Amino acid sequence: MSHWFDRTQDAAKHGPLTLFQEQQLKVLEGTAWPTRKTEAWRYTSLFGLAAEQFAAPSAQLTNPVFADIATIDIIFDGQQWLLPSTLVSGLTIELVAVDRVLTKPDHHLFGLINDTRSQQSLSINVADSCQIEQPIRIVMAAQTDSEQFARVTTELGANAKCTVIEQLDGNSKGLSSLFCEYEVADSAHLNHYRFQLQGDQHYSIGGSHIRLASHSQLDSHIVGFGSKLSRLDIDVEHAGEHAQANLNAIFLLDGKEHFDLHTTIEHAKPNGTTEENVRGIVADHSKATFNGRIHIHRDAQKTLAELNNRNLLMSRNAELNTKPELEIYADDVRCAHGATVAELDEKSMYYLTSRGISRQDAQVMLNFGFINELVDQMQHEAIAEWLRPQLRQRFAQMKQI
């Protein structure tokens, strides 16, 4: 039983709802609160959230520092979206009623909650053949003792290209729920970043859900620092032939932080390609879960899909659960998956410390070497340069026990 779940349904009932939201609320009312017996939540307990009681957010404009590049900023202040005053040609950004699902699967409980609690939906549209040079940055900052819900839909026209950054930041107690949906048309290219960087007092639950048409391309980069409870669901559907998806994810946990990453790749059409790399470093008493599933449908012949998960445990008190999955129904495919869990190499540590490098600095160097390959693959070098000092600072705080 969850008092928070009951309260959030009651709050939805008392707000103005569209017909779509009323339908989603009926589905939500027939959905059970997850327990440890629920497979998708087997390693993540919602016991703490179940007893929480948050206030409605107050309007609070917060724009976290970002890379030294020009971005098109869209900021959620807790109550409403603040839109840019000018836009480049071919780009449309507007607020619309919550009246549809674009690409989000219907089995996500917190996606249903987000549908019923969001007051508006942010709609981004990139016209056919339009190349947006400036990254579009979506910002949601944590607010003290409050809960906030926001949803975004993005549609890329044929042959279009753009970069979208989802940035969640802040260290106050509260809950943030951001769900983003993407429709990527034929031969379009989406560069996608999600930085889930809230502190250890915050609950952060959301998802990014992407549908790829024929010959489209996705490059996605996820960085999570963990929080009191972070849950992120990533869904990618290959809905057209010759679609290509590259997914990289990094999570770095310390203290008693908890991070849960679930990814699902649906290959529904032939000749698709997926390369997924996930790397995690878990320290102190923190806990991480990774569940990566690649589903090859019967008609998805000539698929090439690889999933690799590598992890470092820096403490005997930390916990990491990893579950890579391949579900294959086609017979002409090339697929592979693997997972490893290891500790820092003491020989490498000895080599560095014997040459005058402190153990803490050596630890930072080895940790950075473990994930730097994925940082190097970010298409925007300025974004990677903005991220690197934050990673170094994070490594310096993590305890090896």
Image (cartoon, rainbow, N blue to C red):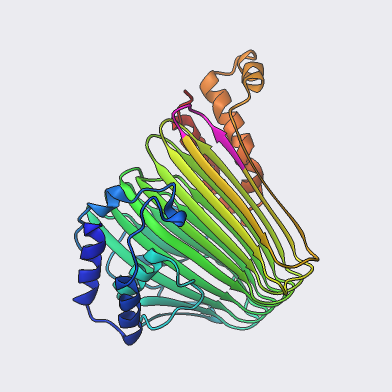
Direction from residue 362 to residue 101 in the image, left or right = left
Q: Which residue sits furthest front?
A: 37
Residue 50 horizontal/vertical position (percent):
26, 54
Instruction: From the viewer's side, name the closer residue of 114 and 289.
Output: 289
Tell me, yes or no, whether the highlighted magenta stretch contains residue 205: no
Q: Which residue sits furthest bottom?
A: 19
**Segment tinted magenta in the rendering:** 310-318
Q: Can residue 17 be seen here?
A: yes
Quadrant of image for the N terminus: bottom left
Residue 265 horizontal/vertical position (percent):
61, 63
Residue 186, relative to residue 261: is it above or below?
Answer: below
Residue 276, relative to residue 16: is it above or below?
Answer: above
Residue 14 horizontal/vertical position (percent):
18, 76
Q: How many marks?
A: 0
Residue 147 horizontal/vertical position (percent):
27, 60
Give the residue displayed 51% in from the left and 45% down from the top: 251
Give the residue displayed 46% in from the left and 55% down from the top: 39
Residue 379, relative to residue 281: is it above or below?
Answer: below
Instruction: From the viewer's side, name the closer residue of 102 and 323.
Output: 323
Instruction: From the viewer's side, name the closer residue of 106 and 236.
Output: 106
Residue 328's quadrant in the figure? Answer: bottom right
Q: Can residue 381 be seen here?
A: no
Give the residue displayed 55% in from the left and 67% down from the top: 134
Direction from residue 384 to residue 115 in the image, left or right = left
Tell me, yes or no, whether the highlighted magenta stretch contains residue 311: yes
